[in-house]
Amino acid sequence: MKKIISKILIYIILVFVSITMLVPFVWMFLTAFKTVSETMQIDPFVIVPKVWQTQNFGNVVRAMDFVKLYANTLSMVALRILFAVLTATLSGYAFARLEFKGKNLMFALVLLQMMIPVQIFIIPQYVMVSKLHMTNTVAGLVFPGIVTAFGTFLLRQAYMQLPRDLEEAARLDGCNIPQTFLFIMTPLTKSSMVALGIFTAVFAYKDLMWPMIVCPDNRATTLASALAKMNGQYQQKYPELMMAALISCLPMIILYIFFQKQFIEGIATSGGKL
């Protein structure tokens, strides 16, 4: 009887938490089809729009160049994933499997970077991007994500979980270190690499501060930055803002639907959170 009661309580809590998490998304969806007056109305409080305003979609599409914004954002995300997985795989394997001088100190610096707020690095990163003449370019957007401390830690943990016997067997078969890394160890960490790619995509997709600083030009910026610039100084058109946010969320929703398992594996492996 106690087990049944505990299960019921757990399910009630999970349902309550799920509803709490879904309310902002439902509110965003409903607001996207309201009029401006309905979004500002308090008494009576309007939850479901009386007439679904589909013209908000047309207004947003005409005001924002979504094709260019999607191209900039997806290019940045794809390149960040490529560089993050490449550098994290190499450095993670080195920290987990190789012995060299200063290894512990270097890994301590990697962990230290994870503890420091990313805002501290913005000024030196912007100076470097400016000196390289990469402002208002996709290369400038990708620059901070070329190396990732989180990815290095994640891949190091993945390589440390593999048995040493695999490397010894490869060495007996005549494999050197690059061959062992490429043909033996790397295929066994595909799930961690996919998890890193998903995390990198999420972090890059929702990045706001860096695109606003390095790409002030509207045609060179990302979706998150363009959404932030939609806020007017004297007037707030919440239906159009929510419609733009709804359109911008679609790629991440689709990504999560197809890669739910890798999301969960990544969180369980790294102990991190989104």
Image (tube, grey):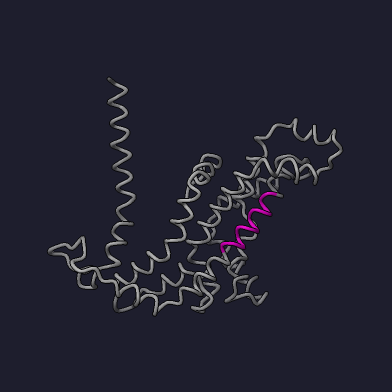
Q: Residue furthest left?
A: 44
Tell me: 199 left or right of 177: left
Give the residue at x 48% y 65%: 208
Residue at 43% of width from left, 61% of height from top?
A: 250
Q: Residue at x 34, y 70 (%)?
A: 241
**The N terminus sits in image quarter:** top left
- Compared with 18, 140 (above or below) is below
Horizontal side of 267 relative to 27 (left or right) equals right
**Rendering coords of residue 8 (x, y %):** 28, 30
- State the residue lying farthest toward the right: 174
Q: Residue furthest top?
A: 1
Asked if the magenta segment contains residue 87, the reply would be yes
Residue 64 within the segment the image draws in magenta: no
Please identify the dominant SS of the magenta region. helix
At a point 68% along the width and 49% down the height, the residue shown is: 89
Query: Which residues lie in the magenta part?
Result: 77-89
Tell whether 70 sits left or right of 41: right
Rendering coords of residue 82 (x, y %): 64, 58
How many numbered discs? 0
Q: Along the line of sight, which residue is nearer the eye, 112 or 220?
A: 220
Is 69 displayed left or right of 104 in the figure? left
Place of residue 243 in the rendered image (x, y in percent of width and height, measured from the top left): 34, 68
Instruction: Report which quarter residue 145 is drawn in.
Output: bottom right
Where is residue 174 shown, x and y percent of the image?
Answer: 87, 38
